[in-house]
Amino acid sequence: MIKKRLFVFMRASLVAAARFFAPARVYTAVLPAALVLLAAVAGCGEAANSFRFVFMTDIHVRPELEADAGYRSAIQKVNELKPEFVITGGDLVSDALAQPYGRAAQLYDLFIEISRDFDMPVYHTLGNHEIFGLYEKSGVEPDHPQYGKALYQQAMGIERTYYSFDHKGWHFVILDAVGMTAERSYIGEVDSVQLDWLERDLAGLAPGTPVAAVLHIPLVSVYEQMKHGATAAFRPSGVVTNSLQVLDILQRADLKLVLQGHLHIVEEIIYGDVHYITGGAVSGAWWRGDRDGFPEGFVVVDVDGERFDWSYQTFGWVAQIDETGE
């Protein structure tokens, strides 16, 4: 079946273009010649600063709906592609928000167990579904020692939910874009402590170092406009509410790429020299098939110096649901 997808390219003004998926279910962004990011040079050896990595977001591991088997299938496909590392984009489990401790801990254990199947290093990003006990129906009180982001930090063995790393001349920044409200809900937000850290982190880079930023809740998207019209707005939980502050800091460096999740769609926005890619979902529509025509998959990025190319790769999963939807 040929599936339609919509990528959005922005350069000074917004242009929407409808494109089609290949029957093999491999999605590739095709840019005009003036915007081609990666040129294939026949007969040339691989450069020292060329590499491939994978961005996998919205995995939503759970024992039900064979989501555990689906995640294993995705990892098998990733291993075949031989990236040098993987970045997950948040919503790793489904979910810790409304669950008691026993269930939430079980989900984290399941995710960590399956993730051992990767053949390469994996860098994780926090998503809203990782926030333990935030919803009152979980029965968890805020004084629980693992409440909020603490369980995620414990399970992942990390001291904080944001960090950076370098790879072959690129600087990668993993941000925590989930804010917790007094009403026990979440919003898209990068807090002030993290903004201060980000400013210091980027200030230490050599001039011209290409930067990629990763976060779960998007900095920018046109999803609501495409679904509900040009004047439709996101709720505070749908995008980062202080995105301008975040971008002001990021763009002081040589920002090239922003990878984001949360929406379960594939989207690319180009504004200036920055590519904002919303990376679909490994789980599709939460392991119930396609999400608005976007099937289960992940983003493959091939880097050559400061240039890159990317594609959305499916892994042949067929949703395992019965007549009741479960």
Image (cartoon, helix red, strand yellow):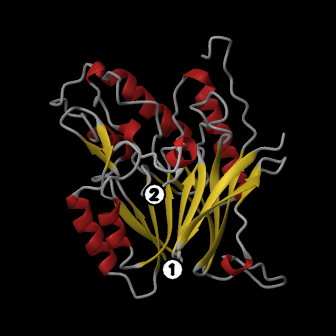
Q: Compared to 122, does 212 lie above or below?
A: below
Seen at 57% across and 47% down, the residue is: 226
SS under mark 1: loop
Residue 240 location (% of width, % of height): 36, 53
Q: Residue 258 vs residue 173: left or right?
A: right
Q: Earlier in the sequence, mark 1 or mark 2?
A: 1
Task: Report the number of numbered marks.
Answer: 2
User: Who is closer to the viewer here, 107 or 36?
Assistant: 36
Q: Compared to 69, does 117 lie above or below?
A: below
Residue 166 location (% of width, % of height): 45, 72
Seen at 75% across and 55% down, the residue is: 19
Q: Residue 100 vs residue 10: left or right?
A: left
Instruction: Find the residue positioned furthest to the top.
Output: 324
Cα distance between the residues tagged 1 and 2? 26 Å
Q: Amino acid at mark 1?
A: Gly
Q: Compared to 297, does 19 lie above or below?
A: below
Which label belongs to residue 220? Answer: 2
SS under mark 2: loop
The residue mark sitting in front, 1 or 2, is 2
Residue named by callout 1: 169
Disc 2 packing (10 Å; few <14; some 14–19; many ≥20) = some
User: Who is closer to the viewer here, 119 or 97?
Assistant: 97
Residue 206 location (% of width, % of height): 39, 86
Disc 1 packing (10 Å; few <14; some 14–19; many ≥20) = some
| Quadrant in the picture for residue 2 | top right
Residue 170 location (% of width, % of height): 50, 75
Q: Quadrant of the N terminus?
A: top right
Q: Amino acid at mark 2?
A: Val
Q: Residue 251 vs residue 38: left or right?
A: left
Which label belongs to residue 190? Answer: none
Seen at 42% across and 34% down, the residue is: 108
